[in-house]
Structure formats: structure tokens, C-alpha cells
Image: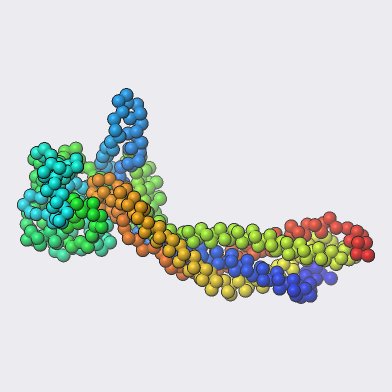
Amino acid sequence: MNFIKRAFLSVKARKGKSILQLVVFTVICVLVLSGLSIQTAANKSAELAKQSLGSEVTLSADREKLMEQQRQERENQENREPVRLTEEPVAVEDANELLSLSQIKGYNYYSTTFGVAGNFDPIETESTSTTNETNKNGQGPGFGGGGSPSMADADISLQGVAFTDTTSEFMDGDAEMVEGTHLSDDHLNKNVAIIEETLAEENELVVGDQLEVTSSTDEDTTVEVEIIGIYKTSSISTDSGMMNFTAMNPYNKVYVPYTLVNELKGEDYKDTIESAVYYMNDPADTDSFIEDAEATGAIDTDIFKLDANDQLYQQMVEPINNVASFSKNVVYLVTIAGAIILGLIVMLGIRERKYEMGVLLAIGEKKSKLIGQFIVEILIIAVFALGIASVTGNVAADKIGDQLLSQQVETDTQSTMDPFVGKGMQMEGGMGPGMGGGNAPGAPNQALVETAQVDDLDVKVTASDLGMLTGIGLLIAILATLIPSLSILRLQPKAILSRQD
């Protein structure tokens, strides 16, 4: 009798064993298919999140490398001085060289400083008033004193840009123009500004009026700027420490061309910027842009870096990435454990069928066909198991995926609410314009951005998932049968039949 026919008859005759193998194999297939489907859905959601966020690359000084250089220089000094981080502006000429790369759809340049209001009054809070009075009396902690303006005297922040409509505040909807026009590269080298609506109303300023602003570092440098636009901000600082400084009040933020900021900062900053932000045509082009930009040789990578600014994206997709990682491990674990469990079941079956195999060997059946019979038997079971898994797998994967993701989102939310984590993040990146932090001035302070995590997975079994499941299922079936069946090669029909007698 053909060994394939014997396999069908054996499966039919041993219903109990066959049903047990079918149940075990089906559970394995459902878990593997769920893991594969969740991974596919997570990758798709991550890609959609990336598309929705877009992609940008920031060119700025590499503060970590600069600090390391400072430490090394300090080690070589006899009288070791405290490490001081020096500012390394980016040359506009170097930043412009990257604009020729094909991956870019837009850009913006940033340079920031603080100033002292001349012919208008900044918006103050009660706490800032107290602080300013303290500083004026010479009791401030390290600020003020002397006749020249200082950081403590600054009462407005000047955000120098090339374009205001591509700043994060306007693109995120936290600010909108209510009158006048945006700043653009047509306004470079011109003394123009757009101011916040509250500041304009309190000082009865309108488009076309002139502002007097004095440099916070040089009292002899005063400029007059024309108001060409008024915007309204919905940004509210939650940092009470920052609100003690009048200049950090969101209403006192004045947008000006970056060339005007450089003029206030001094001659050393002419034709420089603090950072440049390049917006990608396609998020997938981010890595190739960085490679091409470094290949141009316009950037000294010992001093400057190109940062992909994907922290916000990573925050959004962190839960689904964790779920996808967990699902991947489940696929590996179930595949290995399933092969072992099925292998043990097959091994027990072979032991119970030694007499049958002895008879078949005695009448001249080849050992290879006996092994083939066991493989065909498990493949018959596998076909039914794969069919059941393909029908029920989508429901199981959807339920498992939602449960895993909700648990992960809850865990991440609790971590985000940790008060120590919050303070640390703010201290690291929330110092405001021109005062450090890894983000571009005016660009998203991503540590403080309230992100909407991806909290839903659209899990659907795809043809690719079924193909992968079929491959893994066949692999499990063959391994679980082939390895125990190798013991048949050692069998001698005479020895088997004599033991049965």
C-alpha cells in the first residue's frame, strides 16, 4: 500500500491522537498568525504616523562633542578651569549648500537672543514684577548689577527666523496670524517684526508702528523695527520658574528676521545662524539626506551634527513598537515550543506503533517511506490547523493586539506622569531660546510636546501573513516529525517482532 494512503488511513483510524494534534497545532498556528498580524499592523501604523508627522533634519552644533573637547582640553591644563560650553554658530553659507539636495521640500533658519523693550511695555506677571524689583535692587542671584543690560534686564525674546509660517508654533496651530503678513526670506536684512496680539493690545500697537529694542548684551546697540504682522498664541508655559522671567512670557516673544538677531548679538554673529531645519519630501529620504549632506563636505562633523528629530515620532510609536517587539518574541517562542510539543507527541506515537513499523519493515517497506508516512500524517493535520487558524486568526489577533496595546499605553502614561521624569525633561531641553537644549530654537521642544500616542491597531490578516504562517507551520510540522522519526532508522524488524512475541 502506498505510504501516503496509509497516512490518510492512519489519521482517520487514530481519531483521538489526530484531534489532540489538531488542537495543539491550531493553537500554535493562531498564536503565530496573531503575532505576525500584529507586527504587520504595528509597522503599518508606524509608517502612517511617520507620514502624518513628516520628517525634518536639524543642523546645529553638536554639544556633546563640544563638551568632550572642552573636557579633553581641561585635562591638559595645569590649572584646570571649569568646563564652559562655547557657542558654535552655523555659517549661513554652509547651511545654504544643503539646499541643493533633492530630498528637501523646505527649510528654516533660526537664531535667537533677548532684548530690552524701549518704547513699549512687556507683559508681566506678578511674580516677574517681584523678581525684576529684586534684581534691580542688586539682590538677584547672579544677574544684573553694573550699568549695562544683562540677561536679568531682558524682557522680550527675539526669535530670528527665515520664515515664520514654517515654525513649529504656527505649523502646530499654537499660533495664528490675525493681522499683517508672515516673515519670509524677502524680509532678511530688514528691521521688521511680528508681535503677539496681547502685547500689541496692551501697548496699543498696530501694523506699521515702530518698536525700539535694545540688545541685552550691549546697551549701545538699539534698533527700530516696523511691525508688519500680529499673531495670536495659545502657548501657555507651565514652568513657573521660567515665568519668573518676563522675557520667557509667550506674549513677549517677537519674531524677527534672523539677520536682525545677529545684528543685536554683535559683529561675530554676522552671516551665521544657531540652527537650520530642513523638511523632507518623504520621511523615507531622511537617512539618505543625512548621508548626502555629510558627503558634500560643507559640514564639519566634529563640531556640527545633523539630527533627524524623530523623538516625537518615537514617542508616538513607542507603545506599538513595544507590542510589535513582544509579538515577534511570541512568534519565536511559540514556534520553538510548538515544534518541541508536537515532536514529543509524535515521538510517543512512534513508540506506540513499533509493531506496525516492524511488520512493514518485515514485508520489505523502506525506512524512508515509514518516515514519509509520519510526515504526511502531520501535514494532513497541519492543513486543517492552518485552515482553522486562517479563519479565526483575525479575531484572535485583533483582541490580543488591542489588549497588549492598551496595557502598553497605560504603562507609558504612568511613566510619563512620573514627576521626576517630567522635571528632568524640562531641565534638559526647556531652557528656551538660545539657552541650550538639544532642539532647534523655535523648533518643536519635543520633550515638552504633548504627544498623541498611537493607541489603536487595525489588525488584519494579510496574504503575506498567511504565507509566513504556512511556511512556519510546515517547518514546525517537518521538524516535529523528522527528528523523532530518525529513531526508525535504528529499528530492525526481527528485533521488534521478537519483543512483541
Q: How many marks?
A: 0
Tell me where residue 164 sits by quadrant. bottom left
Question: Which residue is at a point 84% across and 64% down the rendered structure image?
Answer: 354
Specify whether 367 is left or right of 152. right
In the image, residue 306 sits, relative to residue 238, either above or below, namely above
Specify whether 371 is left or right of 223. right
Q: Residue 332: x and y, percent?
A: 59, 58
Q: Is residue 8 visible?
A: no
Question: Which residue is at a point 57% across and 61% down the rendered structure image?
Answer: 330
Of residue 498 and residue 106, the one placed in the foreground of this image is 498
Q: Residue 169: x and y, percent?
A: 25, 58
Tell me where residue 76 sits by quadrant. top left
Of residue 353 and residue 144, the one placed in the foreground of this image is 144
Question: Which residue is at a point 84% across and 71% down the rendered structure image?
Answer: 1
Q: Is residue 492 visible?
A: yes
Q: Residue 48: x and y, percent?
A: 41, 63
Image quarter in which the C terminus is found:
bottom right
- Colour pattern: rainbow
Tell me where residue 490 sits by quadrant. bottom right
Of residue 492 and residue 414, the one placed in the foreground of this image is 414
In the image, residue 348 sits, relative to residue 190, either above or below, namely below
Identity of the residue furthest to the top in this view: 78
Specify whether 418 is left or right of 331. left
Q: Residue 285: x and y, percent?
A: 39, 54
Question: Which residue is at a point 44% across and 61% down the rendered structure image?
Answer: 411
